[in-house]
Amino acid sequence: MIIRELEVKSVLTKSALPVSDYSVNPYTGCSHGCRYCYASFMKRFTGHAEPWGEFLDVKYWPEIRDPQKYRGRELFFGSVTDPYLPQEETCRRTRALLEQLRGSGIRLSIQTKSDLVLLDIDLIRTFPEAR
């Protein structure tokens, strides 16, 4: 498994998905490589030679200085990569973002297969419209 840390300008990407205003992916790649994965197309944007499922990019972004500007917006965590991969237990990038956005008034959606989401249930409950 190849794991690298990346500095990115933002972890929030304007979304064309009908379910959200912004896509949020604190990681790119994964450690599973499920055969049915719809996101494996993302490999071509990563610069990785390894097959999908054999690499993970851990994203680091500048602190969001004005999270209030996202008030009322729907943020969809995990549109491409599960925000609660096993590495979240140590890297804590999803939790870091939830902490930055706490009290901002965003609408929060999280897509995950992992019970690691329970590590952040305290924070998730602070977002009134979390799903």
Image (tube, grey):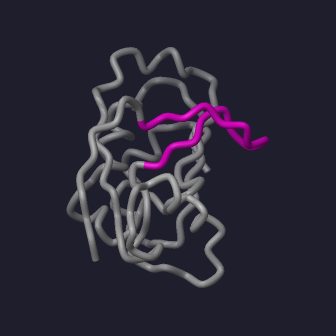
Whole-percent x, y for residue 58 in the image: 30, 54
In this image, 102 relative to 20: left or right? Answer: left
Residue at x 65% of width, y 80% of height:
36
Whole-percent x, y for residue 73 in the image: 63, 27
Q: Is residue 1 magenta?
A: no
Whole-percent x, y for residue 29 in the image: 43, 64
Frontmost residue, 123 versus 87: 87
- The quadrant in which residue 130 appears is top right
Magenta span: predominant SS is: loop
Frontmost residue, 37 versus 52: 52
Magenta residues, start to end = 11-25
Residue at x 28% of width, y 77% of height:
1
Whole-percent x, y for residue 88 in the image: 31, 62
In this image, 59 relative to 83: left or right? Answer: left
Residue furthest to the left in view is 90
Above or below residue 40? Residue 80 is above
Frontmost residue, 34 versus 109: 34
Q: Is residue 18 magenta?
A: yes
Residue furthest to the right in view is 18
In this image, 23 relative to 55: left or right? Answer: right
In this image, 17 relative to 29: left or right? Answer: right
Residue at x 39% of width, y 54% of height:
27
- The mark tally for this picture is 0
